[in-house]
Image (cartoon, grey):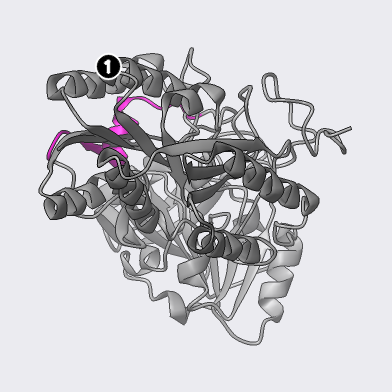
């Protein structure tokens, strides 16, 4: 058997001012055929897992290119078309194939393309024809459009948020693909539109219990191959934004549809109860100061580069400075210019520096301080589960009892190794200020005495009822209270 695998992924915040071109992919991951590293990036696990599976089966894995850009704004049209056509050309050269297994994110938006993944999958289907297995792994923070459902045989999405299971779900994807290619099963997808948009962290109830039920149902329900919740991505202003449930069955479409609807209506009934409680920057700092011991993690949830923002907001840092708080480490503030200045000055230099709050309104004001450059690191990276996340050339600066990591490649704060990679012991600080909505939880919860979720400023469109969408549906919750009426 001959199976083709490739990856093309990013998450697009259509409200973000940060445009994405080919350089953004190259900064995060751009691997030509056969060049993908042993460890997967978030959306490229179908390639690394495919190597294991095809070796076991004695099949030929034909690798296409793998591209991943950290979330930001619209992808340049020419960049999307170049990366798309590169993979399509590789697929044509690989024909005939018995299957196509892809790593996608599902929330990419490019100039001129509201649904790049639907466009890409439709072109893949045109090349291989109607009888070849085409499937993909998706991030749940994606848009499940009718076009991509029509083009693919099945999708498997990560179940966990934080996405600690992307390798395990790639294995699920390949398990179904192998059985389908061997004609042992006939996968069909049933999709239910929940008519809502929400945030669903699995690190707390009620989503923790809901996802545990999905696992149990997969094991106990005859003919059920996979269940996925597409959370949706509220910062993507596209026509089919919203939460969906996917049931993949062995040729049992009606049973799959009934189960997807049952689960989807249960999710709708729990709407508004999933997200953690948030406090503003003043309450967050007050709570951190009151904590008897550290480290206390303050998560600046809406200035999250993993959601397409810049990661350069200074609202919480300014509050810490105003209160005279010390014993603080901040990871990170994105400021490539400040990093360049620090690298030129060198370790040990004491320099005046302006940093942060350059990208957009409502992210605070730049910070002006005389700082000591403690350390500079080229091509720094942190762990994220079984993979590594680059945060580029970086500088550790220190002033007034506060340590700040400045980075040149935007990345959310996945793991405490963000600090240790720069020479800072995160467990030695009373307060750690990080930028992430929930991906940080799995690793930081292991060292944190307390975690505070902070909503500061307005770098991210986090209130769908009042977000100025132009294309997204207006007949879903919370835009309307009862979309079923």
- In this rendering, position of residue 45 left or right of residue 122: left
Q: Residue at x 53, y 66 (%)?
A: 441
- In this rendering, position of residue 469 left or right of residue 113: right
Residue 173 highlighted magenta (yes or no): no
Residue marked by disc 1: 127
Name the residue nearer the viewer: 86 or 294. Answer: 86
- In this rendering, position of residue 447 left or right of residue 208: left
Image quarter in which the N terminus is found: top left
Name the residue nearer the viewer: 110 or 433. Answer: 110
| Image location (x, y in percent) of residue 350 | 37, 59
Q: Residue at x 69, y 51 (%)?
A: 456
| Image location (x, y in percent) of residue 223 | 48, 51
Res 74 visible: no
Residue 19 highlighted magenta (yes or no): yes
Asked if 6 appears above or below 432 in the picture, the reply is: above
Name the residue nearer the viewer: 142 or 225. Answer: 225
Q: Residue at x 79, y 33 (%)?
A: 466
- The quarter of the picture where residue 91 lies is top left
How many marks on residues? 1
| Image location (x, y in percent) of residue 349 | 31, 59
Q: Residue at x 50, y 58 (%)?
A: 218
Asked if 444 appears above or below 267 in the picture, the reply is: below
| Image location (x, y in percent) of residue 57 | 15, 51
Asked if 376 appears above or below 442 in the picture, the reply is: above
Res 474 visible: yes
Image: magenta residue range: 18-34
Secondary element under disc 1, as helix, strand or loop, is helix
Image quarter in which the C terminus is found: top right
Asked if 455 appears above or below 461 in the picture, the reply is: below
């Amino acid at each position: 058997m001959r199976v083709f695998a490739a990856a093309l992924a990013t998450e697009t915040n259509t409200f973000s001012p940060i445009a994405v071109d080919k350089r953004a992919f190259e900064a995060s991951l751009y691997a030509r055929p056969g060049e993908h590293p042993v460890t997967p990036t978030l959306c490229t696990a179908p390639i690394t897992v495919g190597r294991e599976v095809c070796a076991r089966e004695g099949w030929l894995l034909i690798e296409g290119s793998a591209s991943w850009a950290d979330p930001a704004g619209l992808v340049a049209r020419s960049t999307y078309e170049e990366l798309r056509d590169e993979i399509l050309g590789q697929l044509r050269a690989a024909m005939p194939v018995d299957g196509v297994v892809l790593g996608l994110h599902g929330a990419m938006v490019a100039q001129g393309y509201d649904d790049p993944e639907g466009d890409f999958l439709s072109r893949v289907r045109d090349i291989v024809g109607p009888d070849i297995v085409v499937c993909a792994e998706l991030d749940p923070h994606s848009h499940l459009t009718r076009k991509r459902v029509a083009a693919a045989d099945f999708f498997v999405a990560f179940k966990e948020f934080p996405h600690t299971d992307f390798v395990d779900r790639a294995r699920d994807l390949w398990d179904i693909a192998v059985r389908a290619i061997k004609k042992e099963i006939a996968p069909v997808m049933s999709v239910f539109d929940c008519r809502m948009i929400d945030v669903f962290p699995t690190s707390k109830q009620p989503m923790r219990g809901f996802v545990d039920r999905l696992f149990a149902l997969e094991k106990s329900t005859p003919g059920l191959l996979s269940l996925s919740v597409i959370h949706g991505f509220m910062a993507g202003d596209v026509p089919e934004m919203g939460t969906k449930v996917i049931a993949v069955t062995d040729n049992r479409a009606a049973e799959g549809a009934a189960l997807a609807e049952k689960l989807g209506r249960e999710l709708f009934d729990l709407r508004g109860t999933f997200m953690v409680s948030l406090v503003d920057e003043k309450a967050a700092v007050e709570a951190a100061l009151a904590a008897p011991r550290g480290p206390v993690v303050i998560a600046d949830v809406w200035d999250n580069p993993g959601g397409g923002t810049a990661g350069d907001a200074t609202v919480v840092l300014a509050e810490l400075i105003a209160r005279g708080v010390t014993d603080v480490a901040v990871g990170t503030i994105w400021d490539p210019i400040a990093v360049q200045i620090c690298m030129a000055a060198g370790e040990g230099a004491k320099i005046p520096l302006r940093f942060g709050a350059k990208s957009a309104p409502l992210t605070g004001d730049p910070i002006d301080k005389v700082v000591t450059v403690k350390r500079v690191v080229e091509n720094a990276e942190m762990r994220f589960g079984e993979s590594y996340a680059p945060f580029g050339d970086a500088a550790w600066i220190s002033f007034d009892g506060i340590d700040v990591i400045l980075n040149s490649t935007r990345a959310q704060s996945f793991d405490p190794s963000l600090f240790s990679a720069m020479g800072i012991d995160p467990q030695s600080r009373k307060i750690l200020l990080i930028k992430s909505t929930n991906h940080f939880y799995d690793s930081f919860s292991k060292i944190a005495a307390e975690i505070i979720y902070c909503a500061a400023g307005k770098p991210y469109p986090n209130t769908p009822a009042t977000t100025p969408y132009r294309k997204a549906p207006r007949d879903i919750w919370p835009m309307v209270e009862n979309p079923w009426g």
